[in-house]
Image: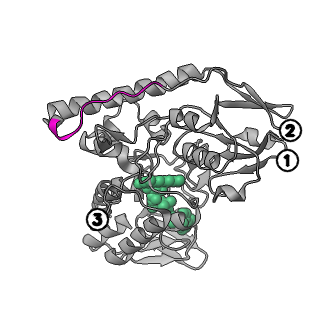
């Protein structure tokens, strides 16, 4: 719909096809208690700013759905809902788009089908004993839907830390399997850490300026949660709540989950990267004369390494009744019959310009900037991608 807004400004004839309703992913693929981890003022969309009473608060799923629905009507986007695209195919210089009820021929296609269409679950899930219930974040709604007893949450990025905290609070003993993660405080020097990401220019770093773009695109989501208290939800917070930390889940053998050691190294690395980022913020505040506006620099205690860490868990003992796979999400291009998807299932593109003339993408990690994957990032990306698209359409054909 952001692309539609800019296409409309240029009077480019277009249609937006949506298999569900507007804001489908927010209506159908999120758990009940989820709030955005981005503050309300960052839920900015082209021509629509947050104007409610709590700019520093965090929207509930219902509020996000409302916000996006308001955007659809305010922008007058020509959305056709209930249209599931089953094929996009090259037809000469154009594309044939097929869905259950509609067939279209068009000169250009913007793929805005989302970066998180399917939860990623590692292959070792198939070796888990059947008595243990397994859920992805798409299946998970609230703790009551899980059996009583221990839960193993796999993955310590935004989804994993949020679900681990919620399940532990529900009275279930939680074990959290921790791999590479991005540690962040919720607030820094009195401001939301995402204010710093924006103000200091880190979020605006462009894809073609980054040293290691592939790595930046694979970076896990930060350990953040949106709450009224603006609480930090790092591993220290989880340990204080009673969550048990174990290493990365490496294998299943004879009904036992085997975890890697090396938590100490993994924690030091995440701590070090956080400190480097805070250094960047401090440097920006100093050189841009903003020091007086914010609190004094802060440094946080290192991540506490448990005195002893279990390297295995018997999945047949009844200790673990459910596993929640918080191991990330991936896009689904099963409907895209143009050879532009690599062996890892990712779209081949250069800043949203896909490797096939007239084909574009939006809403993917670090598409054009670090902030691309967030609601806050779509405006700049959509403007630039539609600029390119307009130039493409204007080429003598
Ligand atoms: C758990 C979770 C939490 C998140 N939290 C935040 C947050 O706090 N702040 C933030 O800014 N961002 C957050 N995000 C990222 C967020 O999803 C994006 O910012 C935003 O929703 C992306 O919008 P999108 O339109 O690109 O993708 P989506 O919201 O995924 O929308 C894609 C749409 O395409 C439709 N579609 C897909 N395939 C087809 C097809 N073949 N035919 C027709 N329609 C199709 C889908 O139904 C869907 O409606 C979160 C993501 C997840 C998964």
Q: Main secondary structure of the magenta part?
A: loop
For image coordinates 52% across by 69% down, the residue present is 97
User: Does label 3 point to a residue whose CB lies under 8 Å from ligand 1?
Assistant: no
Location of residue 250 in the rendering, given as x and y in whole percent from the top left corner: 70, 29
Residue 370: x, y in percent? 36, 43
SS assignment at label 2: loop
**Distance of label 2 from label 3 (alpha carbons):** 52 Å
Please tell me which residue lies in front, 39 or 121: 39
- Give the mark nearer the N terminus: 2 vs 3: 3
Label 1 crowd bin: few (<14), some (14–19), many (20+), radius 10 Å:
few
Q: Which residue is mark 2?
A: 316
Region rendered in magenta: 292-302
- Compared across the picture, whether 41 is left or right of 374 comes to left
Give the CA distance from mark 2 to mark 1. 8 Å
Q: Which residue is mark 3?
A: 49
Would residue 353 be counted in the magenta stretch? no
Residue 293 counted in the magenta span: yes
Label 3 residue SS: loop
Q: How is the image coloured?
A: one colour
- Name the one closer to the observer, 188 or 28: 188
- Circles 2 and 1: CB atoms closer than 8 Å: yes
Assign the N terminus to one quadrant of the image: bottom left
Q: Alpha carbon of mark 1 to alpha carbon of mark 3: how far? A: 48 Å
Q: Is residue 185 above or below residue 74?
A: above
Q: Quadrant of the C terminus?
A: bottom left
Q: Which residue: 61% across, 24% down?
A: 306
Q: Could you tell me how many numbered marks the image carries?
A: 3
Tell me the residue at 34%/31% (across/down).
Answer: 277
Whether the residue carrying mark 1 lies under 8 Å from ligand 1 is answered with: no
| 159 sits left or right of 130 in the view | left
Which residue was labeled with disc 1? 131
């Amino acid at each position: 719909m952001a692309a539609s807004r800019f296409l409309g400004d240029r009077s480019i004839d277009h249609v937006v096809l949506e298999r569900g309703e507007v804001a489908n992913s927010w209506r159908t693929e999120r758990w009940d208690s989820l709030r955005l981890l981005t503050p309300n003022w960052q839920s900015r969309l082209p021509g629509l700013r947050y104007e409610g009473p709590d700019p520093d608060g965090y929207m509930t799923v219902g509020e996000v759905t409302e916000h996006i629905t308001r955007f659809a009507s305010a922008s007058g986007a020509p959305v056709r809902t209930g249209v599931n695209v089953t094929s996009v195919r090259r037809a000469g210089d154009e594309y044939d788009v097929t869905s259950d009820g509609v067939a279209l021929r068009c000169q250009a296609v913007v793929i805005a089908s989302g970066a998180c269409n399917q939860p990623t679950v590692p292959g070792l899930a198939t070796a888990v004993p059947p008595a243990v219930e397994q859920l992805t974040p798409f299946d998970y709604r609230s703790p009551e839907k899980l059996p009583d007893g221990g839960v193993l949450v796999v993955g310590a990025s935004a989804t994993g830390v949020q679900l681990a905290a919620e399940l532990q609070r529900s009275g279930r003993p939680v074990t959290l399997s921790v791999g590479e993660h991005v540690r962040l405080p919720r607030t820094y020097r009195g401001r939301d850490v995402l204010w710093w990401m924006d103000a200091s220019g880190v979020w605006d770093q462009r894809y073609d300026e980054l040293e290691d773009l592939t790595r930046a695109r694979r970076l896990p989501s930060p350990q953040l949660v949106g709450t009224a208290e603006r609480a930090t939800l790092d591993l220290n917070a989880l340990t204080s709540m009673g969550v048990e930390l174990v290493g990365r889940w490496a294998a299943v053998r004879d009904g036992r989950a085997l975890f890697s050691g090396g938590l100490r190294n993994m924690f030091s690395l995440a701590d070090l990267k956080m400190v480097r980022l805070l250094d960047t913020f401090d440097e920006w505040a100093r050189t841009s004369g903003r020091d007086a506006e914010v609190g004094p620099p802060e440094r946080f205690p290192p991540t506490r390494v448990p005195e002893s860490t279990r390297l295995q868990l018997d999945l047949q003992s009844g200790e673990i009744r459910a596993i929640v796979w918080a191991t990330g999400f991936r896009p689904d291009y099963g409907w895209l019959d143009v050879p532009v998807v690599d062996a890892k299932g990712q779209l081949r593109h250069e800043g949203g310009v896909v490797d096939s003339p007239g084909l574009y993408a939006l809403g993917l990690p670090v598409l054009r900037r670090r902030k691309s994957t967030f609601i806050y990032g779509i405006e700049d990306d959509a403007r630039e991608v539609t600029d390119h698209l307009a130039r493409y359409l204007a080429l003598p054909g």
